[in-house]
Image (tube, helix red, strand yellow):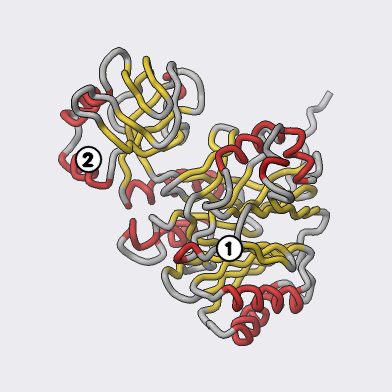
């Protein structure tokens, strides 16, 4: 049983009354197992007071959330103004285990997979993790690497807090902190379907990286990358060439072999620099020899098209119980030039699902069975009842 609500009230008492007044009838008087709250343009004192008030009124087992530059509700995206988004859920047969990192310092938990798993205290049967981190104090790449090592194949979904002027506050039950990572390990009678839409489409053909050093690509199939880019541009349409003004991106396939280089199988990173004299390029990630890559373009219509493509299989599974959306603060009006770009697409395909989310400074979600930090991405978690196990007859 899920409920969601938004309010634009700034004063704590009024915001709390409006949110609880909207959510409690949807929960039919039940205390939620988890309440997820995202707040924008509030002072840190208001954030803590509102969290305490909601915790007292709703009595969730876990309250989890953060401040952000904008929030997302059931049918609207509210950017650059005061707003609060709340999702609460009653989850019978589900266990929600909160955790906070670091507990005593990053060195104590980042040494190896065993130390990391022990710090989380997550049940062995965890189905997925929800996480929020402060981007300035969290070594997020190493943390996600340890999630992948300690809990292989288990999705990690969430985002980096994005409060204006870096005034991030992370909320976990009665605590409000401004550094590190908070999270919830979810296990039991629930399914978590994850949609990660990076909003890009491939152009040209795939290439094998034949020489690379750290985040610099020295050659693609024996030729300088800049030469490959210029060859690709010759074959682009006029409209595609105009999209180069939005930047050029490169996708690293997460599955081996060129035959696996299909849309949706790439981890997208930006092309961050070009050296004209040598023709080498720098990208926003480390890369190794032998990887398969393909150049990508991004625009509003591509972002909508890919999100629709990713959501269509979900629309065929019947209504989800509820959802959380972590979308980039470079999307929204900045990408679509209109309000409600992502949420309108989601509602058109999934209907009136109780949903909440926020605009992130980085989005977290799995591609190809491993968890990554993304940019310009929509990472979405849909909650569904546990699916019955199919038994093969004798």
Q: Where residue 355 is drawn, which disc sits there? A: 1
Q: Position of residue 198 (x, y in %)?
A: 43, 44
Q: Position of residue 280 (x, y in %)?
A: 28, 25
Mark 2 Cα-neighbour bin, 10 Å: few <14, some 14–19, many ≥20: some
Q: Position of residue 263 (x, y in %)?
A: 42, 34
Extreme residue toward the top, this view: 222
> Which is more toward the observer, 295 or 353?
295
Residue at horizontal 56 percent and vertical 47 percent from the top: 314
Is residue 21 left or right of 296 when viewed as pictured? right
Task: Please name the residue that numbered disc 2 is placed on.
Answer: 240
Of residue 101 and residue 40, the one placed in the foreground of this image is 101
Identify the element where label 1 is drawn: strand
Residue 370, numbered circle: none
Could you tell whether 121 is left or right of 166 in the image?
Answer: right
Q: Is residue 1 visible?
A: no
**In front here: 97 or 238?**
97
Figure quadrant of residue 223: top left
- Within 10 Å of the Cα at label 1, are there few (<14), some (14-19), or many (20+) other Cα atoms? many
Residue 206: x %, y % from top left: 35, 23
Whichever of labels 1 and 2 marks the residue nearer the N terminus, that label is 2
Quadrant for residue 77, please give it: bottom left
Split into 4 quadrants, where in the image is the C terminus? top right
The answer to which of 17 and 287 lies nearer the viewer is 287
Does residue 358 appear to the left or right of 332 in the view shown?
Answer: right
Q: What residue is shown at x 39% (from left), y 45% (from top)?
A: 199
Residue 116, compared with residue 216, is above or below; it is below
**Secondary structure at numbered mark 2:** helix
Q: Quadrant of the N terminus?
A: bottom right
- Residue at image x 55%, y 73%? 84
Asked which quadrant contains residue 298, the reply is top left
């Amino acid at each position: 049983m899920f409920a969601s609500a938004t309010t634009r009230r700034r004063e704590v008492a009024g915001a709390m009354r409006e949110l609880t007044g909207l959510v409690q009838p949807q929960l039919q008087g039940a205390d939620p197992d988890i309440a997820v709250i995202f707040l924008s343009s509030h002072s840190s004192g208001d954030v803590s007071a509102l969290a305490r008030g909601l915790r007292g009124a709703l009595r969730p087992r876990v309250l989890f959330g953060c401040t952000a530059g904008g929030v997302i509700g059931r049918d609207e995206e509210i950017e650059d103004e005061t707003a609060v988004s709340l999702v609460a859920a009653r989850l019978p047969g589900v266990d929600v285990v909160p955790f906070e990192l670091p507990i005593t310092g990053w060195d104590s938990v980042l040494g190896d997979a065993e130390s990391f798993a022990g710090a989380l205290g997550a049940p062995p049967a965890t189905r997925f993790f929800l996480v929020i981190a402060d981007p300035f104090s969290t070594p997020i790449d190493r943390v996600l690497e340890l999630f992948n090592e300690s809990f292989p194949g288990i999705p990690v979904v969430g985002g980096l807090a994005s409060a204006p002027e870096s005034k991030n506050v992370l909320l976990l039950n009665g605590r409000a902190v401004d550094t590190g990572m908070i999270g919830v390990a979810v296990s039991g009678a629930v399914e978590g379907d994850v949609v990660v839409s990076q909003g890009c489409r491939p152009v040209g053909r795939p290439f094998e990286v034949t020489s690379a050093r750290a985040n610099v690509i020295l050659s693609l199939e024996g030729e300088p990358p800049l030469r490959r880019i210029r060859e690709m541009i010759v074959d682009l349409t006029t409209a595609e060439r105009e999209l180069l003004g939005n930047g050029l991106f490169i996708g690293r396939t997460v599955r081996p072999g060129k035959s696996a280089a299909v849309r949706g199988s790439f981890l997208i990173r930006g092309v961050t620099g070009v050296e004209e004299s040598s023709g080498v390029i720098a990208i926003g990630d480390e890369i190794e020899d032998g990887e398969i890559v393909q150049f990508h373009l991004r625009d509003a219509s591509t972002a909508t098209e890919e999100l629709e493509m990713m959501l269509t299989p979900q629309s065929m599974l019947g209504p989800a119980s509820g959802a959380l959306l972590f979308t980039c603060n470079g999307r929204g009006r900045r990408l679509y030039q209109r309000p409600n770009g992502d949420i309108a697409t989601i509602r058109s395909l999934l209907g009136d699902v109780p949903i909440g989310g926020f605009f992130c400074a980085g989005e977290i979600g799995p591609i190809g069975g491993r968890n990554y930090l993304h940019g310009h991405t929509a990472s979405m978690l849909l909650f569904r009842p546990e699916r019955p196990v199919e038994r093969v007859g004798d």
